[in-house]
Image (cartoon, rainbow, N blue to C red):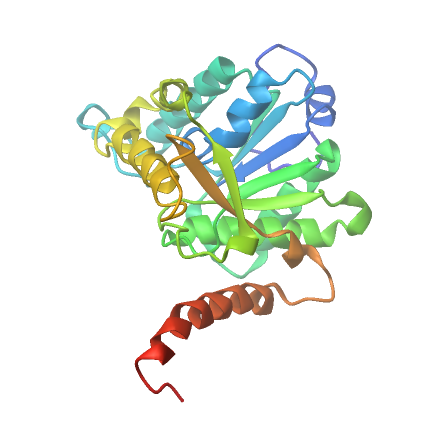
Amino acid sequence: MPGLPPGATVHVPDGTEATVALAAATDVGIVAHPDDIELLLAGPLLDCQADPKRSFVGVVVTDGAGSVRSPHHLALSDVEFAAVRAQEQCRAADAAGMGAVVLLAYGSDDVRGTGSARHEVVASIAAVVGAARPVRVHTHDPADTHVTHVAVAAAVIDALRSVGPTGQPEQLLGWEGWRSLAWLPEAYLHRSDLSGRVEEAMDLARHHASQMGPKRYDEAVPGRWRANATFTNPRHLDQSTAVAVAWDLTATLDPRVDPAVALAAVVGQFSGETASPWSSWWGLQ
């Protein structure tokens, strides 16, 4: 496919020609590592699986070679481990019924840097989005504590800004990962109700066996979803048993706005909302 790096692969579960599969996408999920789609983007992934009018295409930016490993994979070279992770991602895509999954296979340093390698990453993402022209794009939360997740979110924003307004999605969402989004002001919160679908989501995540042993994501992620459901409102009974949340990042696509300024303003709003009750008891100046 034009615009992708030499090491990239496009896996289409149903065997459709790649350009046709991408053009059918309504939702594109762009993440840092194999397993991030199934663990962090489970809401839109399962929504697309259940709706015949929607199609989910995944884009995995790095090869995941530097991630933690199960004891069974410790002896593998980085190249061998990257191949294992790619195979796991393709099996997960098959099980989820994705329209396609694009494995860009960059190194983490490529996306975290500021030089020509990052420019290539941004251009590759723009090429996929241009081929798909989705309604919604999903990526990482830019307040994530995992720097590669944040770097991918930034690359996604830059790629979408580069395609211009006519090529941009209607909505850009950054899904919760290595930091809770419980702090996010309500106006920016997007919720996905996963009640009754948690085990279905974890069945997909367990295709990433190299990750589930050393890190119990299959317990931690549902635990966060459960907490999100309960802590949504202190004065209302629980309406759900599992809720995934995202930061609506659509405003960062406006070319008149510096993304860093737009994101900092949201953090500033949180600071103001948090400090406001304190003035009842303490003299904040």
159 displayed left or right of 246: right
Relative to the observer, which residue lies in front, 120 or 67?
67
Q: Quadrant of residue 239?
A: top left
The quarter in which the N terminus is drawn is: top right
Pick out the residue farthest to the top: 14
| Residue 45 image position (x, y, % from top left) | 53, 26
The residue depicted at 68 percent of the width and 13 percent of the height is: 16
Pick out the residue farthest to the right: 166
The residue depicted at 50 percent of the width and 17 percent of the height is: 96
The residue depicted at 42 percent of the width and 73 percent of the height is: 276
Relative to the observer, which residue lies in front, 192 or 275?
275
Confirm whether residue 77 shows in the render: yes
Confirm whether residue 65 shows in the render: no
| Residue 121 image position (x, y, % from top left) | 58, 47
Relative to the observer, which residue lies in front, 56 or 221?
221
4 displayed left or right of 115: right
Relative vertical location of residue 55 with respect to residue 61 in this rendering, above or below: above
The residue depicted at 57 percent of the width and 45 percent of the height is: 173
The quarter in which the C terminus is drawn is: bottom left
| Residue 142 image position (x, y, % from top left) | 48, 54
| Residue 72 image position (x, y, % from top left) | 20, 23
Relative vertical location of residue 281 with respect to residue 229 in this rendering, above or below: below
